[in-house]
Amino acid sequence: MHQIHVSLFAERCAAFRVTPLQYSLLSLLRDLEEADQTTLASAVALDRTTTTGALKRLAARGLVSRTTSPHDRRAQICRLTEAGAALHGAMEPAARAAHALTVEALTASEQDTLTRLLRRVIAGHEHRRGQPDIV
């Protein structure tokens, strides 16, 4: 299912040159306004190194700003730039279309059931977040 979704996302969103992970980070920053890299890594359930790399690539394109936290010099505070917000807004319909196509073979009720079950699986692994073998 993951591979199907990544393929559909790539088809619909190729023009934006944003990966699914980068889109997730842009979406989080749109909702949170700002967050440190550790918080973002946890929210997308990936290790900090992978998340930091994605954020650096977004920053290099001017889509995200990264500044040193005034409270902890080791922490980088991330914010969506105006260009990042504009890109996210422009690509959101294509990303949502990819999400819808991923589960289009299911009825609305089945889609709700799938979402509920996936949330249970995720919740069942929350205690393992941050462990080296779980990203």
Image (tube, rainbow, N blue to C red):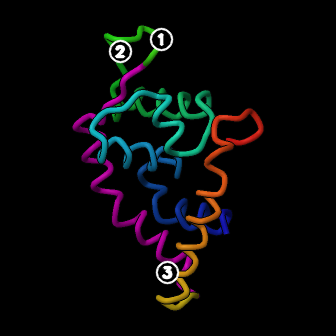
Number of numbered discs visible in the structure rendering: 3
Find the magenta span and give its range.
Answer: 76-105
- Contact check, label 2 and label 1, Cβ < 8 Å: yes
Could you classify mark 2 by the number of other residues whose Cα lies within 10 Å: few (under 14), some (14-19), or many (20 or more)? few
In the rendered view, does 73 fall on the left or right side of 113?
Answer: left
Image quadrant in which the C terminus is located: top right
Residue identified by numbered label 3: 112
**Overall secondary structure of the magenta stretch?**
helix
Q: Position of residue 31 (x, y in %)?
A: 30, 47
Residue 80, relative to residue 30: is it above or below? above
Residue drawn at point x = 43 percent, y = 54 percent: 15
Q: Does 61 appear above or below 99?
A: above
Q: Quadrant of residue 113?
A: bottom right
List the single residue furthest toward the left.
Answer: 82
| CA–CA distance in space, label 1 to label 3 | 41 Å
**Snapshot quadrant of residue 50:** top right
The mark that comes first in sequence, 2 or 1, is 2
In the image, which disc is placed on residue 69?
2
Tag 3: amino acid: Asp
Sequence-wise, the earlier of marks 1 and 3 is 1
> At 58% across and 44% down in the image, what residue appears?
45
The x, y position of residue 130, in whole percent, is: 64, 35
**What amino acid type is highlighted by mark number 1?**
Arg
The picture places residue 107, in percent across and down from the top left corner, at 52, 91
x and y percentages locating residue 82 in the rendered image: 22, 37
The answer to the question of whether label 1 and label 3 lie on touching residues, with beta carbons closer than 8 A, is: no
Q: Residue tagged by mark 1?
A: 74
